[in-house]
Image: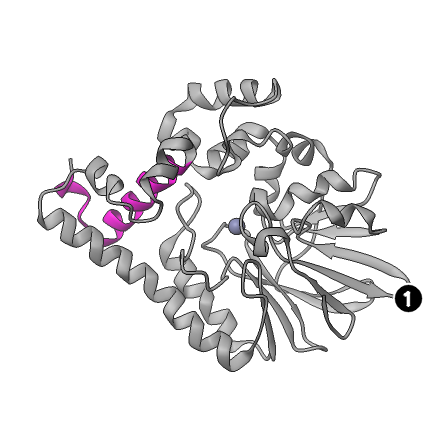
Amino acid sequence: MKKIGPIKVIPGEKNSRFPYCTSLLLENNGSFALIDPGAGYFLKNLSIQEIYLTHYHYDHVWGVNLFLNNVPIFINQEDLPALSELGEFASRLGARQYFGNEYVGWWSKEIKKGGFLAPSLSPYNRPDIITVIETPKNIYPSDEEITLLGIKTIFLKAPGHSPGYVFPYFPEHGVIYTGDYDLTSFGPFYMSADGDIDLFIQSAQVLRMVDAQYFITGHEEGILERKHFLIKLVAFLEIIDQREDKIKSLISKGYSLEEIADSSIFYPVKFQKIDPWVRMWEILGIKKHLKRLGLMSQVS
Ligand SMILES: [Zn+2]
């Protein structure tokens, strides 16, 4: 575990790959706050006074379950609704758009009964999201200097990955948590119904402009110094263009939407077959690119 000033970086299980993430532990005068409590079950041994969530995605929030004894939970205004109601959670991820209204009601009922007899690669089969949603939450302001346990913090707005997405930035220590700008070879996630490719690209500018020395990714890499982070960020964002080039080339060959999805723009086909929400993100992601390219009408 590495420490920069009062900020401890807690790598998650499985190299912080989904459903885990790297968490931050802030400490001041014997008090502790967690940012994105998704590192692993071992977090439950910590004594925590406050929890902050950068956004509503499962891998960054499930750890709320480990601290249900009245620990105040904070999230931003825009992502709060997604963690206030199960149907809204599923809809924001794409279930209403992809499967329809009835499905959302059906899924909400089934997940409350305990889920499905299937492995889960997405929140589709993660019944513990229910207690996260039922736990009351408070709102923190974004793009405003506040203090967490006395530590100066700005939750820098970075919409695109989700509408309320933020980068926690600690100006006194030159540290920023880049979360799902994680530099993984998988590439950027914007496939949910509320994700936005252009905003995702625009929000990367926040990372280029910020006066920080240490960039902490939410998955895999961990701490990178500014120079290395910004070099790798270019390659990470280029994955968006590579996906788009692949889609364009398949369309020119006359592929249908389903056939493009079977060509794995985002996810291996075997994962799309195991988990219906993975297939959902594959299709919704391709549609976002088609819309962006103005090619929607050319695909059956
Ligand atoms: Zn996320």
Considering depth in this image, is 150 or 242 the residue closer to the camera? Answer: 242
Dividing the picture into quarters, in which one does residue 271 lie? top left
Residue 283 position in % (x across, y down): 31, 39
Q: In the rendered image, which residue does mark 1 sit on? A: 29
Rendering coords of residue 96 (x, y %): 42, 29
Q: Quick check: is 244 in the magenta stretch?
A: no
* Left or right of residue 182, residue 10 in this image: right
Is 88 located above or below residue 16 in the figure?
A: above
In the figure, is residue 299 to the left or right of 91?
left
Overall secondary structure of the magenta section: helix
Query: Observer-nearest residue: 243 or 80?
Result: 243
| The magenta segment | 278-299
- Residue at image position (90%, 66%) is 29
Q: Where 235 falls versus 259 (above or below)?
A: below
Residue at position x 33%, y 45% from top?
285
Is 298 contained in the magenta span?
yes
Amino acid type of the residue tagged 1 in the rendering: Asn
Q: Residues within 10 Å of mark 1 (few under 14, many from 20)?
A: few
- Residue at 53 percent of width and 28 percent of height: 87
Residue 292 image offset from top left, x and y in percent: 26, 53
Disc 1, SS: loop
Query: In the orientation shown, which residue stands out farthest toward the right?
Result: 29
Quadrant for the N terminus in the image: bottom right
- Residue drawn at point x = 54 percent, y = 47 percent: 18
Placement of 93 over or under 248, stated as above or below: above
The answer to which quarter of the image holds residue 200 is bottom left
Q: Is residue 56 visible?
A: no
